[in-house]
Image: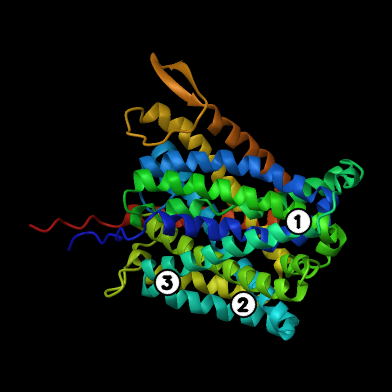
Amino acid sequence: MGEQRLRRRIGLLEAFSFGYADVGAGIYMTLGLVAAYAGPATPLAFAVASVSYLFTALSYAELSAAYPEAGGGMVFADRAFGRLAAFIAGWSLLLDYVVTGSIFALSTTGYLGHLFPLLKRDEFFGPVAALLVFFLVVLNILGIRESAAFSSALVLLDIAGLSVIMGIGYLTSFKPFFDKVNLGVNPDWQSFMYGSTLAMASYLGIEVISQTAEETRRAGATIPRAVKLVSVVVIFFALLFSTLAVGTVGWEVLAASQKDPAAVVAEHLPYGSVLALWVSVIGMTVCYAATNTGIVGVSRMVYAMGREGMLPRWLTELHGRFKTPYRAIVVFAVIQLLLAYVGHLGLAADLYNFGALLSYMVVNLSVLALRVKDPHRYRPYKVPGNVPLRVGGRKVYVPLGAVLGFLTNLAMWLMVVSTHKEGRLVGFAWLLAGLLVYAVYSRRRRAEPLTPSSP
């Protein structure tokens, strides 16, 4: 029997939707959390986070187009540095995919709770979020095209709705507040740094586009276009909407409304009750689409790691009818369901950045390494800012964008490690557990006798 392969069934809209759903939904989730720390400098915190995101997105565009395989950062690290680096990148991203599937389910429940306040009560908040994850687990087993179509519809609704809200807000209710920003005092530097790391959670979804590269039609052209389109749209919305929010309701109100901050902003606009209802619906839908990307991402990453022999190949089994990695979906969905059931939004946000930023550093370094190691690979897109250097007697074009991507992600990761206590403890514990799994499983595979080939 030949190796099972994923089908190429995704186009530009679907690839864009998966990326936008995870990245674009971040503003609904993090706006109140960022305001609680960055205060009137909340838009600036989003701007700082966007720099790291933009450079990394361009690195993903180059690598995903050149190596259109499921696995994303893990595949790139494997080709650049070998299996151990690949495992660390993949295992780090698994943490964030697991958290994505739960944290956005909690945000979905928060906006649903704006419509049905009973759901904001602790005894209902977590269980409802877990139920939402369960529904998407079933949907993803049925197929990637069905899952992609679902995400596309929700994303288009969000873009249209948020554009209307911002138009109304800036024309009727926005009040300049920039004179209140005094970095180092209001907010102080530690609070601003912490807020910037939380804002980074709005931008940690670009990996999911590369995860679907093996299922994307004409991936060499489609993936870079989707990455660049997501980057422009998401940064535009994050900066403009966070500025509108602080200028309309003030950062104090946002900080007190962490479960549904966008709906609270809409309440302060003309026809606020109607617009708040509308924002609650679109916030709920796009956060639910982001929940879906977490399930898609974790299943494809486990599939890729299992196929490369880093995790048991049992996890790579595709469903006989639907051709989806149903075992990977179900196994890691258990963790997502439990984290959603706990219902602690702040804990999930603390965990969200650790693994992705670590993997993103590896991805940016992989661009540099593969320019040297695999110089003749066809690259439909290249990270800009290429400087010619002589390496081993050969001319190599070093992309400054990837260098800056590594440095900015390193700075953000060090900020996370120094300021997020729970994220630091769980993040390093997750890494340690992964390295133990890798060591045990690798030793077991080496000890297994080779199976004779069939005649």
Q: Is residue 362 above or below residue 34?
A: above
Q: Secondary structure at mark 1?
A: helix
Cα distance, mark 1 to mark 3?
41 Å
Query: Is residue 352 depicted above or below 289 in this figure?
Result: above
The answer to which of marks 2 and 1 sits earlier in the sequence is 2
Q: Amino acid at mark 1?
A: Leu
Residue located at (65% from left, 44% from top): 50
Mark seen at residue 171: 1
Describe residue 126's horizontal placement relative to residue 395 as left or right: right
Quadrant of the frame with the N terminus = bottom left
Q: Residue at x 72, y 65 (%)?
A: 262
Which badge, 1 or 3, comes first in the chain's sequence? 3
Expressed as whole percent of the image width and height from the top left, the position of residue 5 reads 27, 59
Pointer 2 with pointer 3, Cβ within 8 A: no
Asked which quadrant contains residue 370, the reply is: top left
The residue mark sitting in front, 1 or 3, is: 1
* Residue in the image at 78% along x and 45% along y: 193
Question: Around disc 2, counting alpha carbons within 10 Å, would you say few (fewer than 14), some (14 to 19), or many (20 or more)?
Answer: many
Residue that carries the numbered disc 2 in the rendered image: 129
Q: Amino acid at mark 2?
A: Ala
Task: Identify the residue under disc 3.
Answer: 140
Q: Is residue 167 left or right of residue 141?
A: right
Location of residue 381 in the rendering, given as x and y in whole percent from the top left corner:
41, 36
Q: Is residue 349 visible?
A: no
Residue type beneath disc 3: Asn
Within 10 angstroms of label 1, few (less than 14), some, or many (20 or more) residues?
A: few
